[in-house]
Amino acid sequence: MQDVLPEGGMIRKLWVSEIDKYRDHLLRLDSASRRNRFGGGVSDETIHNYVDSPIALDTVTYGFFIDGVMRGAAELRPLGVRFPRRGEAAFSVEKPWQSYGVGSALLRRTLLTARNRGFRLLHMSCLADNRRMQQLARKFDAELYFDFGSVVGEVESPRANPLSVMKEIVADGHGFATAMLDLQSRMLRAV
């Protein structure tokens, strides 16, 4: 299924060298979106520390970009050694880009990546009053349950197959090519 994104928008994996784009995105989140992303209010310093902490090689971050600026993100990481084959996902979308299908597109791409990494269960946690995230999780048939003032959603992931791997490879190649063309276009406009 092809996602319909706002005009000029694209989703692609974030490169290690683009960590500043992720930091800038998180810093631009309004207070409600920050609270929803991190499960409580966080300062700019906390965001700097979070982003500057060593990035695990097994973490995959997707970005939603408009005109080369990251406006949304999805992080996928293993839930921990005690929970093999389980991944954890976290999402953030800047307020002007919410309700345009960005979260759905990010979750769809994250589920594909989770599937291809061998995660059988994708775990998402949000605050009990974060109805938007709960609605998104339900859209993907997540099983929701309450846990100490938060809601946990879990989505089962089918096993990877050659087609799912090929879908991710094609999406990555498209993302790379589009990012290079966007960069070239912005550099030419600057001249």
Image (cartoon, rainbow, N blue to C red):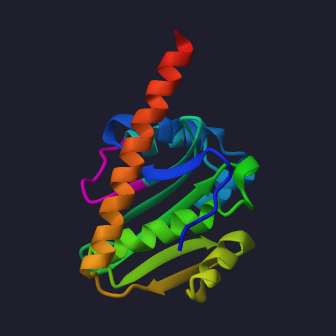
Q: Is residue 105 above or below residue 8?
A: below
The dominant secondary structure in magenta is loop
Residue 105 as seen in the image, left or right of residue 160? right
- Occupied quadrant, residue 158: bottom left
Q: Which residue corresponds to the image point at 35% horizontal and 68% vertical from the top-left?
A: 167
Please provide percent x and percent y for residue 32: 74, 54
Please provide percent x and percent y for residue 150: 62, 76
Residue 139 as seen in the image, left or right of residue 191? right
Please provide percent x and percent y for residue 172: 35, 55
- Most foreground residue, 119 or 3: 3
Residue 19 as seen in the image, left or right of residue 78? right
Residue 78 in sight? no
Q: Which residue corresponds to the image point at 59% horizontal and 87% vertical from the top-left?
A: 144
Please provide percent x and percent y for residue 82: 26, 79
Write the start and end of the magenta stretch as one range. Answer: 53-61
- Occupied quadrant, residue 190: top right
- Most foreground residue, 2 or 44: 2
Q: Is residue 122 above or below residue 71?
A: below
Q: Reply yes or no: does residue 165 show up in magenta.
A: no
Residue 180 in sight? yes
Q: Which residue corresponds to the image point at 51% horizontal and 74% vertical from the top-left?
A: 124
Residue sitting at the far top:
191
Q: Is residue 78 above or below residue 154?
A: above
Q: Which residue corresponds to the image point at 56% horizontal and 17% vertical from the top-left?
A: 189
